[in-house]
Image (spheres, helix red, strand yellow):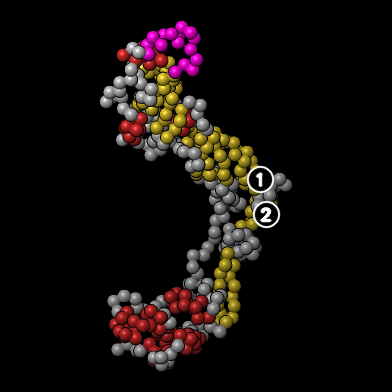
Amino acid sequence: MKEDYYEILGISKGASAAEIKKAYRKMAIKYHPDKNPGDSEAENKFKKAAEAYEVLGNEEKRAKYDRFGHQAFEGGGFGGGGGMNMDDIFSQFGDIFGGGFGGGFSGFGGFGGGGQRRAKGSNLRIRVSLTLEEIANGVEKKIKVKRKVQASGTTYKTCSTCNGTGQVTRVTNTILGRMQTASPCTTCGGSGQMIDQKPADADAQGLKVQEETVSIKIPAGVEDGMQLKVSGKGNEAPGNGIPGDLLVAIEEKAHESLQREGDNLHYDLYVSISEAALGASKEIQTVNGKVRIKIEPGVQSGKILRLRGKGVSSLNGYGKGDLLVHVNVWTPKTLTKEQKEFFEKMATDENFQPNPEKSDKSFFEKVKDMFS
Ligand SMILES: [Zn+2]
């Protein structure tokens, strides 16, 4: 039969939260293992009190316990009695005794993590301006970067404050006996090392700025505003630290004749009335040089010709966008006397009357087509 939690703490069932806390605090001090070395009965009582407080000190758990008794916690948690380990118990102490007890305790191997911390160098940020051609095909850029590197001739020695452990431990005498807390060493920033000798041109951390050419592989399909990370090409860290990263912000230069829309490109092609009527062979600018396309006789202004695969390579590596050529028929803004007479003659010609067929789709249908 498990002991009643209220009885363990020596309080009544109607005890207030403050009374529960007070009762537990009293027992924790009385039976603390540091005060009762080798006394297994005291340790047992210490654990029981902690278990009781774990439940009664929590409003929700206490309500469950009041309704169902020990059964409320069977199957999970610490049903077997005294199932809390010392780390669990000590983690309660910050709550009971206020701050300062959250760190490790001596004698219980309570150091959380600990050990040396490797300092990390700061990140560097640069902008890279790319042409549409570079974006469409991907490019390797060599960029000059001013980064902090470890100055040659800098030597390190073991930090005298923490003796190279990266941590400072402090022992204090408290009501619970000797407490040991650990925190990162402020002298060396947790690295365990400090500078012994450094050249005159190095800064306080033994670093100096150096211009370096960094090669950056930019995949095809990047977009303006994207950021690429080149690991380890930021500022170096002192001593055994690890270098920061180089963060590359992508800027896209505007193209003089091509407009980008995701992986697709748009090109405005102007043809004369004569070319539209007679057909023509026209040169088109693409991201991989110029190509020639054939304009059929009788082409309508607003027609869109799709050149498959002549767009931007997709960033995810799957396929390429298209180049969409928008045909614009150029109407002369002024006419000579002869030209005027020519068009006047044609004005009533039946062949010059607009007569759109189903294949001469409206603008909206073309747009719908483009995105399907
Ligand atoms: Zn140190």
Residue 89 lies, in percent from the top left, at 44, 78
User: Circle 2 sits on which residue?
Assistant: 196
Q: Is residue 310 visible?
A: no
Vertical comparison of 323 with 70: above or below: above
Report the number of discs.
Answer: 2
Q: Single out the residue that lies furthest toward the left.
A: 358
Q: Given the image, on which type of amino acid does mark 2 rest?
A: Asp
Residue located at (49% from left, 17% from top): 333
66 left or right, relative to 108:
left
Q: Residue furthest right?
A: 200
When the figure is inspected, residue 298 is found, relative to residue 51, above or below; the finding is above
Give the residues drawn in magenta, as a range: 331-347
Can residue 148 be seen in this snapshot? yes
- The residue lying toward the viewer, choosing from 295 and 221, is 295
Q: Position of residue 129 (x, y in %)?
A: 54, 35
Q: Quadrant of the C terminus?
A: top left
Q: Position of residue 157 (x, y in %)?
A: 64, 56
Image quadrant where residue 80 sits: bottom left
Other residues around mark 1 within 10 Å, as few (<14) / some (14–19) / many (≥20):
many
Identify the residue at image location x=33%, y=12%. 349
Disc 1 marks which residue?
208
Between residue 10 and residue 133, name the one nearer to us.
Answer: 133
Q: Are marks 2 and 1 in contact (CB under 8 Å)?
A: no
> Which quarter of the rendered picture does the N terminus lie within?
bottom left
Element type at marker 2?
strand
| Amino acid tagged 1 | Lys
Q: Is residue 33 magenta?
A: no
